[in-house]
């Protein structure tokens, strides 16, 4: 039996399918760990809105999708833990121009 569901792209429907399959196979979800971090180190001045959208989708929206998908189950069970792991990538600065990594970290910490 193949239990894999690709959630490498942050599409909400795929995450919901993953949560549904997990609940069918294991009966409950007690802990959600959001551990994602993607970036392509480069100067911010060398990026464009399409790149920003990808960084935001992978590093931020994917967390929201997973939380939204498991939260109803955790509320119904009256318990559960959600752990979101951030990054220290904001320390990466090149000259006077903050890299995209800095923007990623600000998303994670603010």
Image: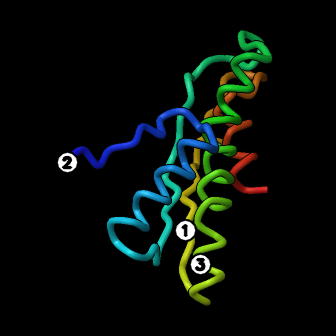
Which residue is rendered at x = 54% and y = 42% of the image?
14
Q: Residues within 10 Å of mark 2 (few under 14, many from 20)?
A: few
* Front of the two marks 3 and 1: 3
Depicted 50 relative to depicted 32: above or below: above
Point out the residue furthest to the top here.
Answer: 46
Residue 23 position, x and y percent, is: 43, 67
Query: Label 2: which residue?
Result: 1
Give the Cα distance between marks 2 and 3: 27 Å
Query: Label 3: which residue?
Result: 74
Query: Which of the 4 image quadrants contains residue 25?
Result: bottom left
Give the Cα distance between marks 1 and 2: 29 Å
Q: Check disc 2 and report its element: helix, strand or loop.
A: loop
* Front of the two marks 1 and 2: 2
Residue 83 is tagged as: 1
- Between residues 44 and 57, which one lies in front from this camera angle? 57
Residue 91 in view here: no
- Between residues 32 and 47, which one lies in front from this camera angle? 32
Q: Are marks 3 and 1 in contact (CB under 8 Å)?
A: no
Give the Cα distance between marks 3 and 1: 13 Å
């Amino acid at each position: 039996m193949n239990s894999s569901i690709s959630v490498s792209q942050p599409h909400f429907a795929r995450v919901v399918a993953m949560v549904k399959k997990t609940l069918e196979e294991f009966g409950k979800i007690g802990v959600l760990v959001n551990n994602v971090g993607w970036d392509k180190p480069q100067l911010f001045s060398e990026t464009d809105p399409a790149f920003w959208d990808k960084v935001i989708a992978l590093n931020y929206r994917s967390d929201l999708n997973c939380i939204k998908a498991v939260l109803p189950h955790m509320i119904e069970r009256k318990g559960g833990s959600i752990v979101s792991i951030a990054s220290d990538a904001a320390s990466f600065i090149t000259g006077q121009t903050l890299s995209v990594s800095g923007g990623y970290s600000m998303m994670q910490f603010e």
